[in-house]
Amino acid sequence: MHRVVPGLTKSSASDSSESVSADSVNSVEVIAPNFKRELSGVTSTIIQLIPLQRANGLNIVTMGPGLPAALPSIGWMSVPALWFKPRTRPFRIWHARRNNEMIAGILMRSVLRMRLKLLFTSAAQRDHKPFTKWLIRQMNAVIATSGKSGSFLKVPHTVIMHGVDTDLFHPPQDEQDRFAASGLPGELLVGCSGRIRPSKGTDLFVDAMINLLPQHPRWTAVMTGRTTTENKGFEQALRDKIAQAGLADRILFLGEVPDVRLWYRRMTLYVAPSRNEGFGLTPLEAMASQTAVVASDAGAYAEMIEAGTGTVVTAGDGAALEAAIAPYLADPAMCESAGRSALAHVRENFPLQKEAVKILEVYENMFDSGSKL
């Protein structure tokens, strides 16, 4: 999953911050642990949601490494305070998003008898392993990030799809947001974003571009995203194929760009060709930038794209992907119409604030019901 987190750098991350005073811990209502040092989609979700949730009046903090120092957090020295209920609630909620966070919550609640109830958010779109299923059954409440991920859960759950920050991701506003400012050849841009690897379907995108671009000379194709060491050979094979087709100046690898938001705004068409995804935010980010989308049905893509905003095809089907892209390249006005509809759709149904409010409703239901197992 891809989220842009403004202002987050390695130097701004805290390994073990204790920004909430010992006295203030007594007022903490919800803890959102982050037990992974490297930046991930889950970490980005926590970083973006907590300020919104606090703005909505919830006293929520995080705990763990790899987080901005400015984010309200507690450290392990504050754990003994969890034996006591907070000032305004009968218990605290421990909102886990990973297995190790569920394990820690179960130990604190069921072994150490701390005043906690446990919530888990599941994004996985596959059958869970037996141990994970057992962990999930120990939760007091469960959120699924899509209907598809919820279909793999064997417990009651609430579906709350991720949202996108519609202030960060917005339509073109000035000349720098136009494709012409990129200095690349052509007049119109089609692109995809994400790590260069088979699971992201980069090869499917390249194959489609090799077949289609000779028929559409106004278009240029780009791929933004990092290539890890183990996928350098994969990228090189794609570069060789592009060169053999004589399209090295029109199908370009840009690498990890400083600001992917700018490239969404420069694109007339965005393609999400993934073979598999957890959730997958890039189509929403593109749609919020007023860009038409063609996507596979990996992750939650099919649940976020509706008729008129883009096209969805079967994941891994290169021929179907190419056939879906072709009409957009042939008719840029079709892209413009879909982009306008996509923007309205995202602003109405997928603003990040809406996700924050829906999660807050789950918290309040847990507090109101006592969430007894």
Image (cartoon, rainbow, N blue to C red):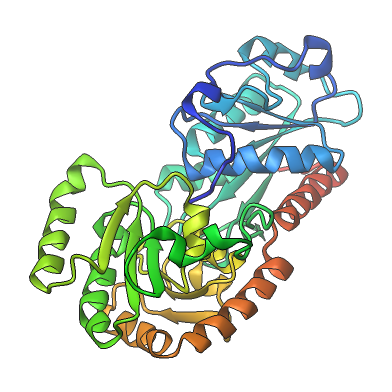
Q: Position of residue 350 (x, y in %)?
A: 67, 63
Asked where in the image residue 330 lies, by quadrant, the reply is bottom left
- Give the image quarter of residue 339: bottom right
- For residue 292, above or below residue 111: below
Please name whichever residue, 69 or 102, is drawn nearer the observer in this view of the structure: 69
Image: 210 above or below 120: below
Residue at the spot 78% in from the left edge and 48% down from the top edge: 360
- Could you tell me residue 145's position as x and y percent? 58, 57
Residue at position x 78%, y 52% from top? Answer: 357
Q: Residue at x 26, y 55 (%)?
A: 197
Query: Split into 4 quadrants, where in the image is the C terminus?
Result: top right
Position of residue 159 measured from the top left corner of the image (x, y, whole percent):
65, 61
Camera-nearest residue between 313 and 342: 342
- Residue at (34% x, 77% y) in the render: 219
Quadrant of res 248:
bottom left
| 345 to the left or right of 149 | right
